[in-house]
Image (tube, helix red, strand yellow):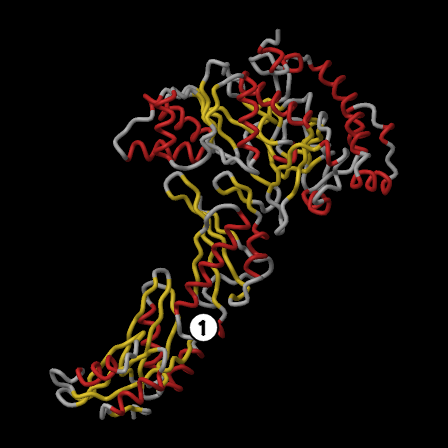
Amino acid sequence: MYNEVRVFVENKPGKLSQVSDILGSAGVDIINLELADDGQFGVFKILTAEPDKAKQALSAAGMTTAFSKVAIIEIADQPGGLVRLADALRDANIGLTDAYGCILERGKRAIFVVKGENLEAIESTARAAGLKVLDSLE
Amino acid sequence: MKTVVDKVGSRFEWMSRDEITEFQGAALRTSVARAARSPHYSAKFDELGIDPNDIRLTKDITRLPFTTKEDLRLSYPDKMLTVDREQVVRLHTSSGTTGKPTAIMHTQQDIDCWAELMARCLAMTGATSQDVFQNMSGYGMFTGGLGLHYGAERLGMLVIPAGPGQTARQIMLIRDFGVTCIHSTPSYFMHVAEKMIQDGDDPKPLGIERAFCGAEPYTEELRAKLQDLYGCRVYNSYGLSEMMGPGVAFECTYQDGMHVWEDAYLVEIIDPETLEPVKEGAVGELVMTTLRREAMPIIRYRTRDLTSILGGECRCGRKHARMARFVGRSDDMLIVGGVNVFPSQIEEVIMRNDWLGGNYVIQLAKQGALDKMTVKVEIAQAVFDGSLDNIRTKRDELANQVKDQVGFTVNVEVVEPGSLPASEGKAKRVMDER
């Protein structure tokens, strides 16, 4: 399991600048950033190799943050690379509530980040399908 | 055979100043003696060593204590009642400063008197039993509903108890039944006109002749605009549930100040700081004493509404004093779409929600002609667990709690902690952009 860093924000211009400025100044490298919008407010979901450092920097700057546990599964960056994981989750009848991916090495390695009701089940299903589950992004 | 004149209490309507003063002296004495029968006033009079028998003339009013909204709150539900519960036939409540409302009870005589005063107001504008009247005010506890209803019925008009909203239906009823008079808040009446114009329609052919507008303050400019849009006359109406409801004061055909019925109310204008009477014609806080109320007479009620008594005589010939347009309040009460709201009511709801920080803002704006209220609250940092579902649910629940408290739908916005203006000293909670 891994800690995704979440930041609660009002839906208004300047929030992305604020977050990226804080993280940049703290020397934190962003691996992935997603935005979930809910009308008047939203949440940034940030994936970084240093979640503790990122959360601390954001909180110290007055932002409202929380960790969210996710499962990170390594997949091959090639057409069909997602199929093995997707089929395994389907066969195990596991539902997801959030999912996104990003490339670590073009043409070689990618990660798929998922959230669901049962993270342990997701991880064990992935492993059983011969996939690597990551606990670190160093 | 009862004539329209009797129905609307005309013998009081045309009293001379001397007759009014004489009538008021006797009526005040009766009212104070009656009030002394209630737990609240008997304790108050005892505490202050007041003997109701000493009250003989209207100027003796200054010997009597004021009554405030707080007194009404503490008297809830019935400590100001002077009759047996069984004689009470109606209850109306109105917004209180805390979660509890204030309660006003009426006997049949009170209801009849209210209808008489209300009919008098309507007849004063020239309305008759030949008119068709649509009441666009909220019914239920809002006195604007049943208050206008009973008065209009007494005058013999065909009364359509449409209630508020459902604009398309309002317009349909006005057309289909040949409505000639309406009662509404000025903002909703404007909203109806704007909606019609937006739809490529014209308010003038509706044939409305008289619009009775009140429950919220409005300017001469807005009145003129409404008159122009509808081709009707707009009459200003003033009332408050503590004094009964609408029918307390109304404009005559000269539309030059609102006549307050001095056979039913003793009026004073005081300085809200010193509590002394202001100079003649000056603006001050309106204080009212009921002269004809049976179940719950109220002595020297601080309305917190700011106005002045117009000098001179009205061209209509009536001698009842005229009040100018209200210029504001001497407290923090807000009027949103004709509904009274105390910021403290909202604060109470917010403080009950421990997922919030203590800072909040009440923002008032116009959406077209209508008032819109937005309550901005700060999420407590520790409460955020990464999920938005949770916040959304709590926000919706808060909106429902506020709606339960104030009686209408409000917008709730959840903002980041520390993003609302922090104040030094007394917090400025209300941003009124209207």
User: Mark 1 falls on what kind of element?
Assistant: loop
Residue at the limit of the structure toward the top, as seen here: B1
Identify the residue under disc 1: B384
Q: Residue at x 43, y 75 (%)?
A: B385
Q: How many marks?
A: 1
Q: Residue at x 60, y 36 (%)?
A: B306
Image quadrant assignment for residue A34: bottom left
Asked whether B21 or B10 is in front, the reply is B10
Q: Residue at x 80, y 41 (%)?
A: B39
The C terminus of chain B appears in which quarter of the rendering? top left
Asked whether B94 or A91 is in front, the reply is A91
**Residue B293 horizontal side relative to residue A26, left or right:** right
The N terminus of chain B appears in which quarter of the rendering? top right
Task: Reply above or below: B415 against B363.
Answer: below
**Residue B185 horizontal side relative to residue B95, left or right:** left
* x and y, in percent, of residue A81 in the image: 15, 85
**Residue B286 horizontal side relative to residue B383, left or right:** right
* x and y, in percent, of residue B231 in the image: 37, 21
Question: Which amino acid type is shown beneath numbered disc 1?
Answer: Phe
Q: Label 1 neighbourhood size at 10 Å, few (<14), some (14-19), many (20+)?
A: some
Image quadrant assignment for residue B392: bottom left
**Residue B101 horizontal side relative to residue A76, left or right:** right
Q: Chain of mark 1?
A: B
Asked whether B337 or B34 is in front, the reply is B34
Task: Reply above or below: A106 against B333.
Answer: below
* x and y, in percent, of residue B324 in the image: 57, 27
* x and y, in percent, of residue B303 in the image: 64, 37
Task: Reply above or below: B314 against B212.
Answer: above
Image quadrant assignment for residue A60: bottom left
